[in-house]
Amino acid sequence: MERGDDAGVYKLREDLAIIQTVDFFTPIVDDPYTFGQVAVANSLSDVYAMGGKPVVAMNIICFPINKMDISVLQEILKGGLAKMREAEVLLVGGHSVEDDELKYGLSVTGTVHPEKVWANHGAIAGDKIVLTKPLGSGIISTALKGKVADQQLVDKCIKVMTSLNKRASELMKAADIHACTDITGFGLLGHVCGMIEGSDVGMVIDSSAVPYFDGIRKLVEMGMVAGGLHRNKKFRLHMVDVAPHVPGYVIDIFFDPQTSGGLLFSLPEDQAEDLVKKMHAEEIEDAAIVGEVIRGPKERVLVR
């Protein structure tokens, strides 16, 4: 609780702990089936970010039964179940309530060895920082609501949001992961700041190395950004030093709240490049080394 880790971990015995997490939200895409897939991929991600394997899940449903046809809910649940099957997760139940606003997600239980849990802190000076998915889903979702999003861009975003972090997490287990989190509502810089807050290290982010969706610059400059982006900046910008050559729209992208974003982790420099190559070979094509952990200034993020 003190560090705001992605999920709770409870030790059952010397070689086994359970991971528990819960997440649900309102639709960010128009298609119900796709929304179900995105919601499940997002919910499972916290278990992967802790180094665990999701095992069972329960549906959480808020549905306006008097305003929407039940077929909408059926499609959402079908999409969610398909993604759970892909993740080899067993659906064991759930709970539904009538609500004026549609919401869907999961409560997830996973397993992990107590000595192999990845926390969101513990990065060591000299580590490289890796990100596995591109940024910009919040901006694209906002543009979709505003009916100005290019369909090709939306399709690319949906492909990323429905992609599980399962394989990336599995590949990472062969490396010495010092800190890990998944990029969600706080945006890249929000999560980076959380990783070094209260620590003796700082981080450098190479703005030219960070992957984000092509075509979102114009959306940012049009003002198609989520309210959460501004809240993220207000909360964390005091910890960030931005080099003069880095454009303002890039910083907005780095604070963009993500849905079902990638894993962000630190590991020894001599292991980073090889792991990224393995990810590329496994079709995690956007994985990239985006920065490094430095001795100082501590608790500062330098964007250059």
Image (tube, helix red, strand yellow):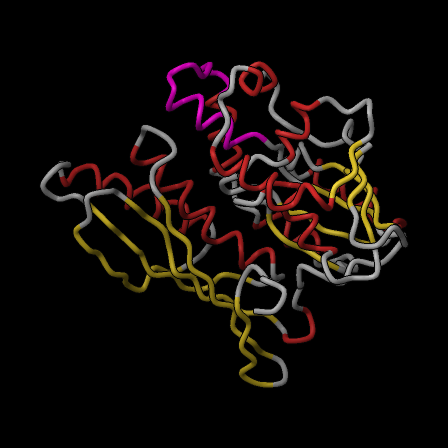
* Residue pictured at 55% horizontal, 72% vertical: 9
Looking at the image, residue 264 lies above or below residue 110:
above
- Left or right: 223 in relation to 187: left
Q: From the viewer's perspective, tell me whether residue 75 is left or right of residue 114.
A: left
Helix, strand or loop for the magenta stretch, by majority: helix
The boundaries of the magenta stretch are 136-153
Q: Quadrant of the C terminus?
A: top right
* Camera-side residue of 59 and 203: 203
- The image quarter in which residue 13 lies: bottom right
Q: Is residue 226 magenta?
A: no
The question of residue 143 being in magenta is answered with yes
Q: Is residue 210 above or below residue 174?
A: above
Q: Whole-percent x and y of residue 300?
A: 79, 48
Report x, y in % for residue 92: 31, 64
Determine whether, in the image, residue 19 is placed left or right of residue 33. Answer: right
Identify which residue is drawn at 70% across, 59% down: 173
- Vertical relation: 135 (above or below) 193: above
| Residue 207 located left or right of residue 169 | right
In which image quadrant can residue 252 be found? top right
Report x, y in % for residue 286: 67, 32
Question: Is residue 146 or residue 83 the one in the foreground?
Answer: 146
Tell me what residue is drawn at x 56 percent, y 69 percent: 1
Q: Residue at x 21, y 37 (%)?
A: 72
> Which residue is at the front of the view, 44 or 125?
125
